[in-house]
Image: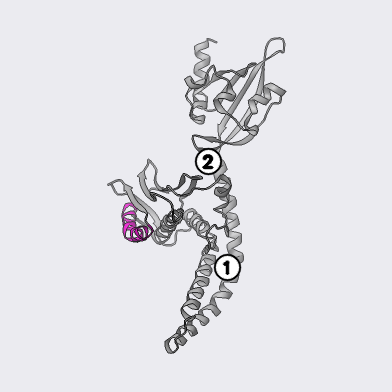
Amino acid sequence: MTSALSETILDSMPLGLVAIDNTMTIIRYNEAAANIMGLPVEHVLGRNIDDVFRPRANERTIQLTLERQIEFRNYEVQIEVCGQMQWLLINTWLMRGDHGEVLGATMAFSDITAVKEMEQHLVRSARLVTIGEMAAGAAHEIRNPLTVIKGFLQLWERDHQHPYLPLILREVDHIDKIVQQFLQLSKKDLQHTDGQKEFDLLETIRDLNGLCDSEAILNGIEFTLHHEADPIPVLLNRTEWKQIVVNLIRNAFDAFTEAHPNKQVQVHLRRRRDHAALFIVDNGSGMSKQLLRQVRDAFFTTKENGTGLGLAICESLAARNGCRFRMYSREGRGTVVVLQVPLR
């Protein structure tokens, strides 16, 4: 087999392939590897692998294969590529000469980020359903006496003036809000079609100016919308879609400290081949990797008066409408939330 044909075969492989010699110098690096790792071939070949990728201890798979003759099979590892976390499935093996001498090591890998995200989504969805079922029973029992309490307080307020009455009613409303959120989490059907209608996504995004602009001005935030001119037809529950987007934008507004300079929140709507993508971008405080993993869990909150259910409900509503929900963040740099919406 000619060298040119071998190179063509390597570059045609869907798997990323990296090979190093005994000095840790990269001697093979195919196009799939370049696409997955975000580094062009000419930037990598002939260089020391540790200098190129600067791996953490758990990422030194091909190096350990060469140093300790440990071959990895179906090893899953999460790495940072171009500022984003990516999951790789890795296999390594030693390269040997005709007499069994070690010549180097080879690593084949594939990007399994989409698979891992789906696994995490299914686990999170199952957890939300379980929490919702448990909470719904309690919520129904709380709601009935709460309605009676609120009614009598409102009647009493007509004839009595007391400084604590407005505070009590606000707290009752807060409890009622939590109960409503519990009931939303109890909806189990992740693909329900109740209330779904065809509408123009662009129209609802334009409405956000009226819904969110005043709140942004009050908080000193520059709020901007960026979208295309052509209609984007979708089939969604319009009320739930509005709830998702408004809640996510308000979360972005909450990302800033009082002293934060140049507060900006941007909403971008883009049409792709088979879906629309909505990006909500803020330049706020951002989140650490650990906080980013926790923030979507039910009952986890960093807000003083938060319930920890807002993002959980957004994700649940998005899943029920066939939308894909993702978050990216970097501490001190800001956060990006992405909603992928199937086109009609």
Q: Which residues are magenta?
A: 201-219
Q: Position of residue 54 (x, y in %)?
A: 58, 29
Q: What colour scheme governs how the chains and residues are painted in the rendered image of this protein?
A: one colour
Pointer 2 or 1: first along the chain: 2
Q: Which residue is mark 1?
A: 136
Amino acid on which the number 1 mark rests in the picture: Ala
- Residue 344 appears anywhere in the view: no
What is the quadrant of residue 57 in the picture?
A: top right
Q: Position of residue 229 (x, y in %)?
A: 27, 47
Amino acid on which the number 2 mark rests in the picture: Ala
Q: Decide: few, some or many residues near mark 1? Use Cα within 10 Å; few <14, some 14-19, many ≥20.
A: many
Q: Decide: few, some or many residues near mark 2? Use Cα within 10 Å; few <14, some 14-19, many ≥20.
A: few
Task: Characterize the magenta stretch by its predominant secondary structure.
Answer: helix
Q: Residue 114 shows which numbered tag?
A: 2
Is 238 situated left or right of 184 in this image? left
Q: Residue furthest bottom?
A: 159
For the point 59% across and 20% down, the residue is 19
Q: Quadrant of the N terminus?
A: top right
> Any magenta on residue 202?
yes
For the point 60% across and 70% down, the residue is 137
Q: Position of residue 196 (x, y in %)?
A: 40, 59
